[in-house]
Amino acid sequence: MSNQHWMQRDLSVLWHPCTQMKDHETLPLIPIRRGEGVWLEDFDGNRYIDAISSWWVNIFGHANPRINDALKAQLDELEHVILAGFSHQPVIELSERLVALTPEGLNHCFYADNGSSAVEVALKMSFHYWRNLGKRDKTRFITLSNSYHGETLGTLAVGDVALYKSTYEPLLMEAITVPSPDCYQREAGESCREVAERMFVHMEQALARHADEVCAVIVEPLIQCAGSMRMYDPYYLTLLREACDRHGVHLIADEIAVGFGRTGTLFACEQAGIRPDFMCLSKGITAGYLPLSVVLTHEQIYQAFYDDYQNLTAFLHSHSYTGNPLACRAALATLDIFEQDDVINANRALAQVMGDSVAHLKDHPHVADVRQHGMTLAVEMVKDKASGEPYPWQERRGLKVYQHALSRGALLRPLGNVCYMMPPYVITPEQIHLLAEVMSEGIDLACR
Ligand SMILES: *Cc1c(COP(=O)(O)O)cnc(C)c1O
């Protein structure tokens, strides 16, 4: 059975995510037969290096033997059980380990089953905390421009990527949007830290003006991934933590994409030495095996909900697959690998290889920026290097890179005009060099 066969059957019954289905009249859909390590293999026998970790979730390769074994063992014990009134070993062990690994003081874990749901939990919990304290004016959230927190209505409302948001605007609550400290917007001679300091003035003003009506500030620490991999300096988070405390506003760290080593540290918040009030985790948590998410929070929040039932202060939120045992088992196996293989340290060398492999692109006539935080690296293509004028989105230059990469055996899926690598940590230096070569060729072709 060939790619063609499966593509036809697929297109007659499926509606794919984040896709204009008409594109598939000309752009072939790629049905995958199997995966192994960084490789994906289709039904025609073509192989592709998964340079984007299958939408940022896969961190230890496909069909990882260690995670497979853990899951097989769990399957024979328990596949799922209700998490209200009942509990199970994997979710307890996972919670203990997450509490130990995340910033000091985050000691209560609330589970959901995907990233958007975790953000919804954090937003609702923050709002509900203030309500339990009698602060009923606190109903709003502050977010950064160009941020992304998911696709549900609540998360779109606190996001700011127009492509996903603008259509649904009439349905959304109104967030307070503050300009982001995006280092791509730096002025000549300015460092990322200086950008962070300069841009923080806007956040300070928003907090001073709106603190009475604001529940929380929500940010993606260090990298706005869906917002074209724009990056900023950790110093912004340090300033933000201090200001949130001073103004009596929560800080929600959405580490759904950046958590589990993507920025070089296990969690991005570590680089600023801060503890958020809520930390949302998903994506890499199960190494891309199963849907799972969790919100960690501290004692003070937990205690504001802890009361006699009749007082109706409980957080009555749930999802059917909350804390699924198979997903938790995959997460435990993932944490084992981090520990046993000293992954964060080993990644330092890989990150260096990634940076070196594309360093030459800084001189490309249509590349305005090559940026990196640890295991995430992005290259910004522009129409005019001197002015930074972007290519019009309608030209879909990134799609040309994507198509070229496929023909060369790589899954590189640019975000608009931004090409990036966010590979599984089992990638080798040779494979990184191959990706860099394919990316360079793709950029040459796309920028003709
Ligand atoms: C992917 C993502 C989400 C949403 O997670 P889903 O599992 O896709 O709902 C939220 N926040 C960030 C930063 C993300 O990258």
Image (tube, grey):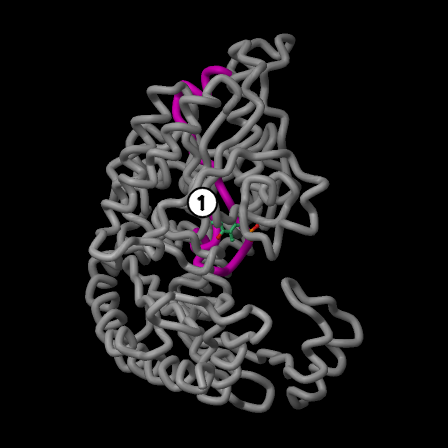
Residue 63 appears in the picture as rendered: no
**In this image, 110 relative to 321: left or right?**
left
Magenta span includes 168: no
In magenta segment, residue 299: yes
| Residue with the mark numbered 1 | 281
| Position above or below: 241 against 27 | above
Q: Quadrant of the N terminus?
A: bottom right
Q: Residue sitting at 35 percent across and 45 percent down? A: 181
Q: Residue 343 at x, y = what percent?
A: 26, 59
Say what secondary structure mark 1 lies in: strand
Residue nearest the observer in this picture, 345 or 220: 220
Quadrant where the image shows the C terminus: bottom left
Q: Amino acid type of disc 1?
A: Leu
Left or right placement of residue 235 versus residue 138 in this view: left
Would you call the spot at circle 1 few (<14 residues within 10 Å), some (14-19), or many (20 or more)? many
Residue at (60, 45) in percent of width and height: 156
Q: Quadrant of residue 69?
A: bottom left
Whether residue 199 appears in this view of the structure is yes
Above or below — where is 279 with respect to 444?
Answer: above
The spot of residue 268 in percent (x, y) is 32, 47
The magenta segment is: 282-304
